[in-house]
Amino acid sequence: MRRAVRLLGTFLAVAGALTLLWALVVWQWQDPFTALYTKWEQRQLASQY
């Protein structure tokens, strides 16, 4: 039982740290997935032009 609680606590701490890291990335550099998609779309539009 103690081992399971410790594993759960470790998992929750890591998940919280990753969530804070993701929030920092989105706050600083906007959403990276949207930025990559926009870049790809702009390149496609530029080649059509």
Image: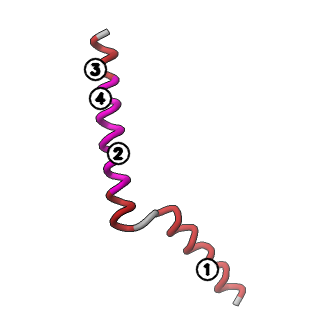
Task: Identify residue for label 4.
Answer: 10
The answer for how far apart the CA atoms under marks 1 and 3 are is 49 Å
Mark 4 secondary-structure assignment: helix
Tags 3 and 2 touching, CB below 8 Å: no
The answer for how far apart the CA atoms under marks 1 and 2 are is 31 Å
Residue 4 coordinates in the image, percent (x, y): 34, 15
Q: Residue furthest top?
A: 1
Q: Judge whether 23 appears above or below 32 on screen.
A: above
Amino acid on which the number 3 mark rests in the picture: Arg
- Lower position in the chain sequence, tag 1 or tag 3: 3
Tags 4 and 3 touching, CB below 8 Å: yes
Instruction: Find residue 6 and name its label.
Output: 3
Task: Identify residue for label 2.
Answer: 18
Q: Judge whether 22 appears above or below 3 on screen.
A: below
- Residue at 64% x, 86% y: name it: 46
Q: Quadrant of the C terminus?
A: bottom right
